[in-house]
Image (cartoon, grey):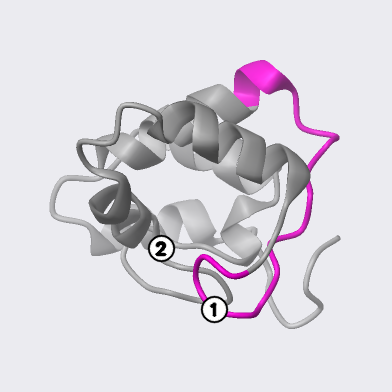
Amino acid sequence: MRHPRFSTALFPIALLASLASPPTLADLELATKSGCTVCHQVETAVIGPAYKEVAARYKGDAAAVETLVAKVRSGGAGNWGQVPMTPHPHISEEDIRKLVQWVLSL
């Protein structure tokens, strides 16, 4: 479900323009298509944490990919405050894994 106040149509362009070394357009398109950019941006916390904050928190954690794949799939609350992350069972396991690996690479 998209947040009514946010339009995701321009997120990839705005994110690419604001980054010194931007993620690929394919990564941003997948994140946008999957609905992730409604709540997350690369450098700025919106409703959820910025992707770079997530990458910093899980840096060096060997279980991070599996932990975050499960979190994206099932949702939850408490890791970044009380605003819950919506479950995303409609996103394929392969796409979730790609997104998580991309976020952790930032």
Q: Residue furthest top?
A: 94
State whether residue 26 appears in this view. no
Give coordinates of residue 69: x percent, y percent: 59, 33
Residue 88 visible at all: yes
Q: Position of residue 59 (x, y in %)?
A: 22, 42
Q: Quadrant of the C terminus?
A: top left
Label 2 SS: helix
Residue 102 inside the magenta-drawn segment: no
Q: Residue at x 47, y 51 (%)?
A: 12
Query: Residue 54 at what x, y percent from top left?
Result: 37, 54
Residue 74 figure quarter: top right
Residue at mark 2: 14
Disc 1 residue type?
A: Gly
The three-letter amino acid code for the residue at tag 2 is Ala
Q: Hey, which quadrant is residue 84 in on the image?
A: bottom right
Q: Quadrant of the N terminus?
A: bottom right
Task: Look at 64% across and 58% down and name the residue there.
Answer: 9
Left/right placement of residue 8 relative to residue 106 reads right
- In the image, residue 42 sits, relative to residue 89, either above or below, namely below
Verify CB contact (< 8 Å) between mark 1 and mark 2.
no
Height in image: 84 above or below 87? below
Q: Secondary structure at mark 1?
A: loop
**Residue at 31%, 27% in the rendered image:** 62
Indicate whether 11 appears above or below 81. above
- In the image, residue 87 lies at what x, y percent? 79, 50
Magenta span: 78-95
How far apart in space, not on screen, are marks 1 and 2 (Cα)? 26 Å
**Camera-nearest residue between 65 and 22:** 65
Left or right: 40 as drawn, with respect to 71 = left
Which residue bears the numbered disc 1?
81
